[in-house]
Image (tube, rainbow, N blue to C red):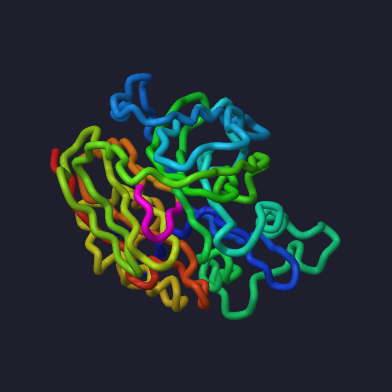
Amino acid sequence: MNAPGSTLKMTRRTALAGAMGAAAVLGLSRVGVRAQSTPEAGPFSGLGLPELNVTITDTGYEGIPSTLTAGRYLVTATANTKPISGQQQPPTVAFISPTSAGMTAADFLQILAPPPASSPEAGAPPAAGGHQGGGDQHLPLQVYQMPFAGGVLVPSGQTAQAVIDLKAGEWIAWADDPSIPITPTVFTVTGDVPADLPEPASDITATLIDFAITIEGNLTAGKHVIKVQHHGAQPHFLEIDKGPDTMTKEMVQATLDGEMSGTPAAGGMSESDLSPVFFAPTQSIGTTAWYEIDLPAGTMLAACFFPTAGTGVPHAMNGMIDVFTVTG
């Protein structure tokens, strides 16, 4: 526990772009995470799923066909990238479809584009009433109508896997962060998702709703398969960090409330109290994704910081956190 007055700067990485007249990049920075590397024979190898093998380079994504058939995919991502100076988030390939929101991929990519350097929005200070922790980040309403399928986060030079579902529509593979200069890839998914899909065996389940997280299952140190299921109306992502053994849910919430109000909680936590463990990119209602997770023993914090529709307040500040213990 830190000295009184310290705050928990746990806000999410740059997420999406807000549109207030002209497109502007949101400044939702978040702590880095330890990605889960996967050997060639990972936990999903025997399912017979169609495979989507993606190579992340410094400038784009390789290996994504222009057209895929709707279904459940084993996504294997390899990061052939150089670390970006000052960027804590490892390379990511995440998947979002603007189709059901009545937008094309080109429309959405225009929203993601930063404003020209000469525009009034470029370099503008935060709006009055916004706090440095990442609140008041308003996103276009269409973003909340778009399917997010999850994705894969992987450290440079390594490989990681996830199992995700892709339904019919136009999709965008992107870095889940418009500040990262990796060019998105647009592709089309056709047909219907098969009714009988093989499901990976998992021994931990994370359930995301508006606004709560539950983590259940075999919470022991070591490698597991985690099923991340989304039952909330708003998009959510999942990050898990290891904290001090004295950490409680009440302590974290008090610290977040203090950051939101600008009055730090006495005896609050700070970012240095947390070590990144796991991150699952944004998902939307009705989606499920599976990942390998390597849990250390100790006290963990699960949280989502996606902006709340209408207010922009990060979901964690609405109570979307959980604290749980992993035994050795």
Q: How many marks?
A: 0
Question: Quick check: 50 above or below 283?
Answer: above
Q: Is residue 268 visible?
A: no
Residue 202 lies in what quarter of the image?
top left
**Which residue sits furthest right?**
118
Q: Is residue 226 visible?
A: yes
- Whether residue 285 is in magenta: the answer is yes
Residue 323 appears at what percent x and percent y?
24, 58
Residue 192, relative to residue 210: is it above or below? above
Q: Position of residue 235 (x, y in %)?
A: 44, 61
Direction from residue 188 to residue 36 in the image, left or right = left
User: Which residue is rendered at x = 67% and y = 40% of the image?
Assistant: 183
Q: Nearer the viewer, residue 179 or 251?
A: 179
Q: Quadrant of the N terminus?
A: bottom left
Q: Nearer the viewer, residue 42 or 87?
A: 42
- Using residue 327 as the reference point, say whether residue 38 is left or right of it: right
Q: Position of residue 303 (x, y in %)?
A: 35, 58
Query: To which quarter of the image does residue 278 belong?
Result: top left
Residue at position x 64%, y 40% from top?
185
Which residue is located at x 34 percent, y 57 percent? 230
247 part of magenta stretch? no
**Relative horizontal placement of residue 125, taking residue 165 as reference (left or right):** right
Which region is colored magenta?
282-288
What residue is drawn where x is 82% and y is 57%? 117
The C terminus lies in quadrant:
top left
- Front one among 237 and 276: 237
Residue 32 is situated, as x and y percent measured from the top left of the image, at 46, 45
Left/right placement of residue 193 relative to residue 176 reads: left
